[in-house]
Amino acid sequence: MSITRYIFVTGGVTSSLGKGIISASLAKLLQSRGFSVTIQKLDPYLNIDPGTLNPYEHGECFVTDDGAETDLDLGHYERFLNFPTSQANNVTTGRIYQSVIDKERRGDFLGKTVQIIPHITDEIKRRIKLLGSKYKYDFVITEIGGTVGDIESLPYIETVRQLKWELGENAMVIHLTLVPYLSASGELKTKPTQHSVKTLLEAGVQPDVLVLRTEKELSEDIRKKVALFCNVSLQNVIQSIDVCTIYEVPIKMQEEGLDKVVLEKFKLPIGKDPELKAWKEFLGKYKKPKKIVEIALIGKYVELQDAYKSIAESFVHAGAVNDCKVNLNWIHSESINKDNYTEILNKVKGILVAPGFGHRGMEGKILAVKYARENNIPFFGICLGMQAAVIEFAQNVLGYAKANSSEMDEKTQYPVIDIMEEQKTILEKGGTMRLGSYPCALNKKSNAFKAYEKELIEERHRHRYEFNNKYTDEYIKAGMMPVGINPETNLVEIVEIPSHKWFVGVQFHPEYKSSVINPHPLFIDFIKATLE
Ligand code: GLN
């Protein structure tokens, strides 16, 4: 297909209806029909990217191969499509304004008054169309963050209006709303949807398709009513009913014919429904696990599980491969201390210490590592979790009781984890960590090699501190091995304890690369070890 078609997904009534999942599900269905599809998220906040946001504010920060710190929805896109995204797939208002203001300072506007329309909207358009012109996708699905009617979203909705006009038959709008169920009267209510579509119409945008989130089946009458009030045809009113897993949504959308409605709108041949065989196989395994395994996830943001979204999803994928359900025990690292750690951790079959920043909760993380190491419990440390494993080993095996990361104690006598050389002079916080994909060479005797079944891997990073190679010999002598090394910089990317059942610490973030079709080998192998 030589033309790129643009699909805009907006949301109304409330946030958190799952625009990201609907976008990803539609993309999956179109991809399964042989089209090339990408999904983009436009975020209406002023931060340049979510990299500087506290996870309590915005959940996990997802990192792409090209080192962009992005919204967690990009994680869903990749997990559904099994295809990498990049910086171009996530744009914030901050980034838009920054480019426009930079241009203004350069004099690019030739003395013109710089305004939201057309300058900001032009920049938004440029970033949407870039995906089509540069990467030649058949479909670009652009998800507009926030809810229609928000002051912050206005320039985006205005851009959608302009693009719909400009692109004509090659653009369409899908609006996702909620049809609430009032239990007192036992009724489903369409008024919020009608109002939300009105708000969109006030901005000059007529949606082509309505996707209605609901907890109960929508009757034909309700669908007809929505169609009538909102100027869409009956078949373009799509029900999105609550389901037990997000991975069920593509199946439901296929049943509702969302992809067909889209193809029809673009006057493209419809053909047969794709089988989604591998997807359904995964779902089958997910829904009928043969066993359950209890895994502790130790972190300091556990009150907000979105902060560890990709890790949780990686366990869903890896669990299915192992025919089991992974029951995550979310344990706050600050709740673990010397007196209770045995009691807290003796119920689980595996321990994962999560990524993180700063010293809060570090003591609990180190105790969790100690428990796993001493009791031969499969252990998986990710980023700060790996660093905690290195510190614990120094403190309790090498005998350096005061060993630490210089992140936690700048003056520590034994900085077994130390700031990377190139990070020492960096003062700005945004986008300055070691970010994105780097190669790593594996030792053939390692668990990692056994899992990946290859010698050279590439994984994504997001950190400033690193294993201190000054101590490598001491670690090796005492039984903790660096088994994954960056071939260019010699940075230690993986440590293992070969005498332990399964003890793997990784400096990178494997969770960013796990997808339904391609579950991550380390997560698979970790779960396997917990079942043995
Ligand atoms: N705070 C650690 C570092 O910057 C670990 C980062 C992480 O877990 N993502 O090196």
Image: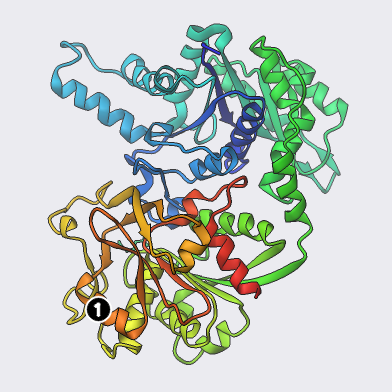
Provide the secondary structure element on which disc 1 rests: helix
Residue at 78% in and 42% down: 181
Residue 77 falls in which quadrant of the image?
top right
Residue 243 is at least partly visible in this image: no
Q: Amino acid at mark 1?
A: Asp
Farthest residue toward the front? 444
Quadrant position of ligand 1? bottom left
Residue at x 45% of width, y 86% of height = 337
| Image: 450 above or below 206 | below
Left or right of 168: which side holds 459? left
- Neighbours of disc 1 within 10 Å: few (<14), some (14-19), many (20+): few
Image-based side of 337 in relation to 409, left or right = right
499 or 306: nearer the viewer: 499
Rendered location of residue 108, percent (x, y): 18, 15
* x then y, percent, for residue 473: 25, 78
Front one among 320 and 303: 320
